[in-house]
């Protein structure tokens, strides 16, 4: 199986005498048109450069496609094809937007508008009725405008539900299964906690947008491969899968960077949610190709097609279910053909006279399945992509990804192609539909495998809870199989999000061994540590069987199990050992670490993948600040500090003190208070503070007295321990921790 590895390789634009190298670019936007992909990153001084690919893996540099002097250092260019015109939108130097147009994705582009402002990161989307929308960055949310084809931009609508707590940028919208998905980026480009979130709307492009429980889909604050952001999403070459492109911006401990790197990972859809199988670091399977594909207007592919009596047909046949696509210039008389078995039985789609008409022809009888008016000004003399999804529950019809309607279940068996079209170009079909191919994906590990995306042939029944969440119901004797792609050989934690309805026995089988575990009745969904097992690197399958009992299963998460770590430091040794992230530095003193400035500081200990344990510290609070407290951290898997990012740039748990109260925060680039209680502490007095976490239970001690134990059903799974302050002046004299 062919593989790729992030970052993806984009050949540099070569000048005379230059050696071939790999381009370091940011803000990668990828657009699919006529079976090919075009990548446009933020521009340098000479204009906008583009790359082309047929498979999302092997790229060729086209060169400069837009060289208007205004486009020097153009931010985040994007294109959008609508009714024969490619619209290019960008904000040169971040100083307002321009729109350009062309009849070709590689230009030349001519300026359509003057600078109409509206911040940066413009992105265009067409709804099913042909209405155009412009999305762009804003503070604190993404904003949207209706957009006319002449470039006129209408009033702004703030999209509540898209805010990332600060300046939010890089929007991208697509529609799938009747829902609108928007991805966006926040936390500042130069923050290691730069990240990608998403939101969902069931009403329309202007919302309302709902914040899902798994809102952050890509984040990695590691120095070497972090600062992930500014994404675009695109359908893969198999016509079924979705892929996300984004960049990383590595930084060293001195704050120096050497360019951005473009990356790609698979988007998955467990139920109504969006998830990303990443960020991947190791080798991954390349995006799959369609079962049949070719360009009917290319001599290289002429053997893939049958030509007879004005018809162009694929030489191979699609099965009963799957996705089929024909890109053509229909003209006044041309039609697209699907499920073509002979001249007596087929499905035709016509776009004549401004109407989208679907007919079923069978034994000289013609049944009109769908007849809908297309948007005003629809042109039949330009390329359009006609797409049919033959699903098990219905058949769906699209033109240029705009859904035109759905009808009863139809058998997709047969060839596809065209009849009497002015030009027929890309023709393809694949035996997956509605992202059913997600069930064949090898989930990147470390990472998550979702029960709803178990391999075909697995048991279980989808169950929708009262809160709308969707899980898999498994009863005694039922088994699911999952595909995983393990980055490297080693010991891994196996955790599940699961609810058992009584005494239950679970068996998990892996390539390297198996184990069983008994579960008691649970009142709600919980994160459960199943075991630690050694896994070999590479692609493989695993299974989970309910031997007795009944469970709801959401996911299985696998991540490295580092060696236990137990240490104690004080004074200058503590100052030298602590791993301090960027921010306002602490002062090294004989007594310990002095956090002496009105800024953020975090000193961390242990491994990112440690799960349970405790941290204890002797702390002298010089002062208390209710807005900027200090205290202890546990299970901090992401951390970042930058003066223009969100105030809380972490994911994990924080135990804080303000002199009057103690409180526990669940941090996820923001905070949710899990507990608060009275705890009177005095300034300029030393206290021994201890915080423990085991499973979902968090306990707090002050001077040897246990003050509270708090339980979370869905806790963060892993992270480091730490001491730090969001601004209050503090002296940490001693730290002791034990992590495993």
Image (cartoon, rainbow, N blue to C red):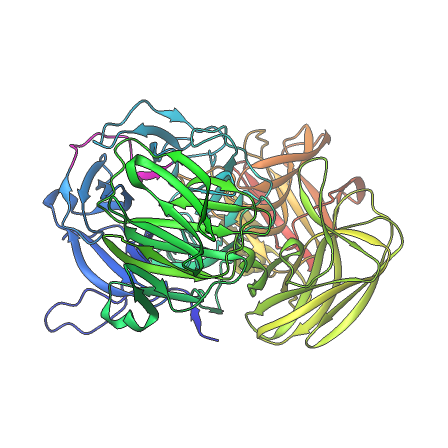
**Looking at the image, which residue is at 49% across and 48% down?**
586
Between 171 and 658, the one lying in front of the other is 171
Q: Is 12 in front, or is 380? A: 380
Q: Is residue 123 magenta?
A: yes
440 relative to 134, above or below: below
Q: How many marks?
A: 0
Is 567 displayed left or right of 71 in the figure? right
Q: Is residue 192 visible?
A: no
Spot the residue most to the right. 503
Say if the magenta span includes residue 33.
Answer: no
Q: Position of residue 112 (x, y in %)?
A: 16, 36
Horizontal relation, residue 78 to residue 525: left or right:
left
Residue at 38%, 33% in the rendered image: 129
Q: Which residues are magenta?
A: 112-126
Residue 571 place in picture, x, y as percent: 59, 55
Is residue 511 depicted above or below 184 in this figure?
below
Say whether residue 587 is visible.
Answer: yes
């Amino acid at each position: 199986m062919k593989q790729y590895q992030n970052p993806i390789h984009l050949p540099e634009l070569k000048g005379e005498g230059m050696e071939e190298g790999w381009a370091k670019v940011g803000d990668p936007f990828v657009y699919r048109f006529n079976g090919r992909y075009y990548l446009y990153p933020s521009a340098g001084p000479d204009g906008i450069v583009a790359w082309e690919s047929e498979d999302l893996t092997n790229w060729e540099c086209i060169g400069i496609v837009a060289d208007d002097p205004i486009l020097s250092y153009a931010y985040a260019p994007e294109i959008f094809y609508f009714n024969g015109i490619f619209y290019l939108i960008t904000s040169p130097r971040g100083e307002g937007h321009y729109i350009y147009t062309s009849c070709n994705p590689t230009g030349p582009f001519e300026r359509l508008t003057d600078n109409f402002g509206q911040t940066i990161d413009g992105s265009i989307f067409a709804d099913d009725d042909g209405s155009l929308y412009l999305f762009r960055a804003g503070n604190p949310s993404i904003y949207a405008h209706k957009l006319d084809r002449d470039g006129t931009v209408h009033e702004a609508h703030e999209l509540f539900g898209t805010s990332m707590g600060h300046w939010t940028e890089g929007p991208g919208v697509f529609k799938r299964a009747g829902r609108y998905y928007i991805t966006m980026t926040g936390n500042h480009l130069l923050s290691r906690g730069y990240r990608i979130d998403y939101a969902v709307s069931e009403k329309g492009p202007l919302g309302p947008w709902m914040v899902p429980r798994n809102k952050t889909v890509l984040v990695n604050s590691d120095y070497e491969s972090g600062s992930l952001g500014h994404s675009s999403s695109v359908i893969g070459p198999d016509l079924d899968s979705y892929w996300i492109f984004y960049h990383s911006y590595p930084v060293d401990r001195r704050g120096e960077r050497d360019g951005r790197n473009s990356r790609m990972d698979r988007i998955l859809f467990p139920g109504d949610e969006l998830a990303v199988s990443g960020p991947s670091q190791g080798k991954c399977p390349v995006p799959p190709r369609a079962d049949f594909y070719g360009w009917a207007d290319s001599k290289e592919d002429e053997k893939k097609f049958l030509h007879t009596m004005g018809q162009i047909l694929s030489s191979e046949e699609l099965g009963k279910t799957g996705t089929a696509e024909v890109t053509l210039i229909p003209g006044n008389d041309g039609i697209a053909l699907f499920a073509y078995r002979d001249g007596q039985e087929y499905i035709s789609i016509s776009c004549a006279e401004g109407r989208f008409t679907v007919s079923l022809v069978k034994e000289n009888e013609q049944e009109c399945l769908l007849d809908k008016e297309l948007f005003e000004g629809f042109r039949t003399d330009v390329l359009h992509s006609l797409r049919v999804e033959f699903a098990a529950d219905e058949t769906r019809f699209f033109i240029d990804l705009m859904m035109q309607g759905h009808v009863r279940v139809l058998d997709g068996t047969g060839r596809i192609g065209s009849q009497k079209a002015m030009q027929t170009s890309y023709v393809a079909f694949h035996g997956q539909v509605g992202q059913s191919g997600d069930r064949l994906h090898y989930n990147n590990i470390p990472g998550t495998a979702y029960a709803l995306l178990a391999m075909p042939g697995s048991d279980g029944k989808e169950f929708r809870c009262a809160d709308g969440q969707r899980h898999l119901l498994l009863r005694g004797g039922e088994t699911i199989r999952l595909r995983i792609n393990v980055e490297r050989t080693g010991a891994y934690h196996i955790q599940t999000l699961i609810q058992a309805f009584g005494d239950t026995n679970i068996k998990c089988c892996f390539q390297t061994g198996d184990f069983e575990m008994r579960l008691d009745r649970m009142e709600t969904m919980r994160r459960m540590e199943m075991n630690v097992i050694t896994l070999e690197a590479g692609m493989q399958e695993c299974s989970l069987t309910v031997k007795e009992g009944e469970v709801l299963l959401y996911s299985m998460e696998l991540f490295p199990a580092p060696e236990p770590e137990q240490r104690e430091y004080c004074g200058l040794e503590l100052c030298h050992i602590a791993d301090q992230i960027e921010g306002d530095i602490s002062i090294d003193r004989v007594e310990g670490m002095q956090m002496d400035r009105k800024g953020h500081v975090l000193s961390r200990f242990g491994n990112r993948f440690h799960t349970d344990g405790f941290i204890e510290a002797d702390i002298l609070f010089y002062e208390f600040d209710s807005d900027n407290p200090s205290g202890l951290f546990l299970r901090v898997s992401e951390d970042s500090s930058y003066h223009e990012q969100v105030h809380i740039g972490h994911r994990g748990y924080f135990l804080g003190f303000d002199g009057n109260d103690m409180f526990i925060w669940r941090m996820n680039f923001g905070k949710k208070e899990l507990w608060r209680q009275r705890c009177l502490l005095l300034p300029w007095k030393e206290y021994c503070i201890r915080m423990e976490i085991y499973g979902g239970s968090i306990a707090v001690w002050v001077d040897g007295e246990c003050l509270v134990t708090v339980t979370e059903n869905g806790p963060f799974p892993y992270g480091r321990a730490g001491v730090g302050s969001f601004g209050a002046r503090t002296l940490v004299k001693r730290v002791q921790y034990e992590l495993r």
